[in-house]
Image (spheres, helix red, strand yellow):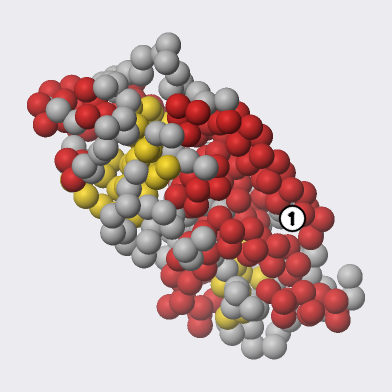
Amino acid sequence: MNRRAWLAGLLGAVSTAAVAGTGGRLAASPPQRIVVLDWALTEMLLSIGVVPVGAANTAGFLRSFPASTLPRSVVDLGLMFQPNMELLLSLKPDLIVVSPAHAALCTSLERIAPTVTFGRYRSSATPYTDARAETLQLARMLDCVPRADALLAHASNVLDEARARLAALPRVRDTPLYMVRFLDETHLRVYGLHSLFGELFATLGLRNAWQGATRSGAYATIAFDALRPAFGTTLLYQKPLPLSVVNMMNTSPLWAAQPFVRSGRLIGMPAVPAEGSVASAIYFVRVLVDALEQVTPHHSLTATPSLSDARDGAREGRA
C-alpha cells in the first residue's frame, strides 16, 4: 500500500474517530508497532487480526472481555490511565490508540508516537452500529480492510441466525426483558434502549423492559425494587454475582416479592462488557439466545441463584 492510499484511509477515519495531535509525523506505510491503552479498543484491534505490541492491564482485559484472547507476546503497560511511560517508550511504537477518556494523556503520548482516538461509539445512541463503522475506519488506517469486512459479515450472519432461532420462540419475543448487572445487594445497573445491549435487543426484535431515564441513554443505576416490572417480565442478570447479592436473594422478603422472582423468570448469563465492540456484540447475541431458549412452556427457571454464581466470580478475581 503506497503512502497516498494510506493517508487517504487515515483521512477517511478522521470523520468520526479523531486523529489526536499526530504533529504530521505519519509514516509512509501503515503502522506495525501499535500500543493501545483501552480494553474495548484492544478488542477492536484483535478482532481485525492486529496484535498490539503493548496494551493496558492485560490480565484485566482477559477477565473482562471473554470474546477475545490476547497473545502472551503483548506487553502489559499497567493501568489504563497511568501506563508505565518508560516501558511504553521502550516498545518504540509507531502508533498509540486511545479513547476519548485519555484526552489528558494525549500531549505526553504524542511525544512518543502519533496518537489516535477511537471509541466514540460508546457514547452514541447506536453503539453497535457505530462500533461497526469505527472498526472499518481503524482497519482502513491499518491496511486490513478485508479482515474487517469478514468480521462485519460474520456479525451480520450471527444476528441473522439469532433472529431465526428466536422466531421459533414467540413466547420469548413477546416478553419484556430487563438486562441488568448487580453492583451490590441493593443496587443494579439496568441497560436502556441506547446501550449496546439495548440496540441488539431492538435488532433482534426483543422488548427492552426498561423505558426509564438512563445515563447518556445507556444505563441507569437504581435499587432493584425500582424496576417496576410488568406481568411476565424476565430478568436477565450478568454473572458472576457478588456474594452479598446471592445472600440477599436467598434471604430478602423484598426480593422474594418481585414478580420475576415469584414467577421464576430469572436467567443468569455470562458477563459481557457493555462498552465492548463488535466481537463483544457477537458474543452477547450468542449467549443471549442460548439463555432465552431456556424460557419454554415446559421449563421452569431457577428463581434463586445459587452460591455457584458467586464462586465463579471468586475464581475470576484470582485469575
Taking 244 as reference, is 41 above or below it? below
Residue 132 in view (yes/no): yes
Q: Residues within 10 Å of mark 1 (few under 14, many from 20)?
A: many
Give residue 95's quadrant in the image.
Answer: bottom right
Give the total number of marks visible in the rendering.
1
Report whether 238 appears left or right of 41. left
Report whether 148 appears left or right of 264. right
Report whether 262 appears left or right of 148. left
Residue 243 in view (yes/no): no
Give residue 253's quadrant in the image.
Answer: top left
Secondary structure, mark 1, is: helix
Taking the spot 22% from the left edge, 22% from the top edge, the residue there is 262
Q: Which residue is mark 1?
A: 148
Where is residue 170 shown, x and y percent of the image? 50, 28
Taking the spot 50% from the left edge, 48% from the top edge, the residue there is 202
Residue ranking furthest to the left: 253
Taking the spot 18% from the left edge, 45% from the top edge, the residue there is 226
Seen from the viewer's position, the closer of residues 128 and 313 is 128
Taking the spot 59% from the left edge, 59% from the top edge, the residue there is 129
Please name the amino acid that badge 1 sits on. Answer: Ala
Which quarter of the rendered picture does the N terminus lie within?
bottom right
Seen from the viewer's position, the closer of residues 4 and 57 is 4
Where is residue 30 shown, x and y percent of the image? 78, 70
